[in-house]
Image (tube, rainbow, N blue to C red):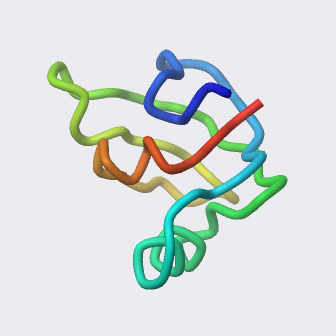
Amino acid sequence: MPTLKDIKPGATVQVSRINGIGPVKRRIMEMGVTKGADVFVRKVAPLGDPVEITVRGYELSLRKDDAELIEVN
């Protein structure tokens, strides 16, 4: 299953699952990235870190390691 890290800028995807445990998963979910949320990938830095996204009307930056934990459709 593809992760948010694999998605190209300009694409909108839906979160299907968040991997990870404890504080890492909780931090991602507190940003509004939850199962079923639509995520628009705005920009990816040249080396892949950070990944800039828009979710629920908020513009966020995710670390590449966090983006790998988010499975999308």
Residue 7 percent location from the top left of the image = 53, 22
**Vertical position of residue 10 compared to residue 24: above or below:** above
**Vertical position of residue 48 compared to residue 56: above or below:** above
Tell me what residue is drawn at x 61 percent, y 35 percent: 40
Question: Which quarter of the figure is the C terminus placed in?
Answer: top right
Residue 6 percent location from the top left of the image = 48, 22
Tell me what residue is drawn at x 78 percent, y 46 percent: 16
Tell me what residue is drawn at x 56 percent, y 18 percent: 10
Residue 48 percent location from the top left of the image = 25, 28
Tell me what residue is drawn at x 39 percent, y 53 percent: 66
Relative depth, front residue between 73 and 41: 73
> Residue at the left extreme?
47
**Vertical position of residue 33 compared to residue 52: above or below:** below
The image quadrant of residue 68 is top left
The image quadrant of residue 23 is bottom left
Relative depth, front residue between 47 and 18: 18
Question: Which quarter of the figure is the N terminus placed in?
Answer: top right
- Judged left or right of residue 30, residue 34 is right
